[in-house]
Image (cartoon, rainbow, N blue to C red):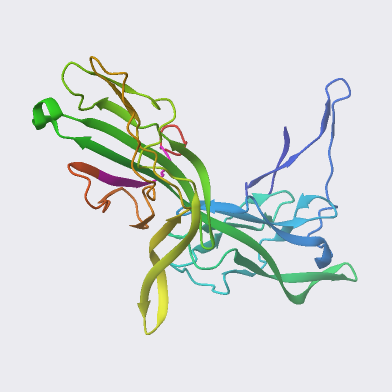
Amino acid sequence: MSFATQDATGKWSFIDFDEYDSAGRTLKGSIEHFSYVSKSADLQLFPHTEDVRVKGIGQFWLYNVRTKKHHFVPDNTTFTWYVNGLNLPSEVYGKISSTDLCCFPPGSRLVVGDYDAPEVVPDADPIPIQLEVALATVRNNKISRAGTKVFTSYVRTYDEYDINVCGIWDNLVSGQATERFVDSARLIVRLRPNEAETIELKNSLFILEKNYCPRKCTCEYVNRETCQGLIHIAGISSLAFEGKTANNVRSRFTHVTLNFKPAWTDFPILRVICPRSSGNTPMPPGRLPALPIFLKFELKEGMQEQELNVGQLGTARYNATIRRREYDKKTGQLR
């Protein structure tokens, strides 16, 4: 709960209290003697969170590490915010602006900066956030200016993509030789300027829905419970960003290439049993590199689709669907 006061101009201010005694009609809390003055060594610029998603918002507070409280300054205190050394909005690194929060004591304010992350991850990781603020000293019970001091903190930005790779072999027009299989993998990846973190990874088993089998014979899918198929993602080995350039100076990233760790295909093994035969289990083809080997896509909202080049695989179709993860406005959850 809070204790409220109103000044002569009608402005309300609030201070939290720790205990309330209804019988004694007393409130117990703490005030810093209505003083704005602190040792600059006690002040630090703290982020509300060190990780901010692209197009997201983060906050920074001037904090007194000795009193463990947010720091108050007079209303007329001047200060300037910088993002990566710039005090102007930047499409590469984002922007930061002050939020006016009046508080107790009257005539004071909290130093709070709202950081707006850029639309794509920048090349800096982390990004330095700086606050230049006018300091005050007390002499003969009077507050006077004592120059400025720069406080520095940092923020890391990231982007997330949901990647689905799917392969379908479907030659339904081949009559008795008709075959159909489905193979897939899903990866959710968090991208930073220098690393890719796997949030979720799932490789589905190779689904053989229909396969060619000689007449009067039976065919058994021997490794149904373990076959990974031609698509298998073992993880990300490296990433590389690309961006627009003007006069040999990059303005912002536009594309990223993900290189996947080496993995091998896993083909289905079929046992064919025919009349007057003890059965035959043909050996699967030799090992080949699994798909995908790499993916390159744009850093943007919405759905992207691309076809994978898989060489001579008959009527097989392999494609990747890439979608940037966005917050659902109704649930507030990433999807």
Residue 4 located within the stretch drawn in magenta: no
Answer with left or right where residue 19 lies relative to residue 58. Answer: right
Quarter of the figure with residue 60: bottom right
Tell me which segment is drawn in magenta: 318-328
Answer with left or right where residue 83 lies relative to residue 287. Answer: right
Which x, y percent locates residue 265? Answer: 39, 43
Along the viewing direction, whichever of 247 and 221 lies nearer the viewer: 221
Q: Quadrant of the C terminus?
A: top left
Q: Quadrant of the N terminus?
A: top right
Answer with left or right where residue 62 lies relative to residue 81. Answer: right
Residue 326 located within the stretch drawn in magenta: yes
Which x, y percent locates residue 174? Answer: 10, 31
Which x, y percent locates residue 169? Answer: 22, 37
Above/below status of 117 relative to 205? below
Above/below status of 96 relative to 266? below
Along the viewing direction, whichever of 82 and 118 lies nearer the viewer: 118
Viewer can see residue 222: yes
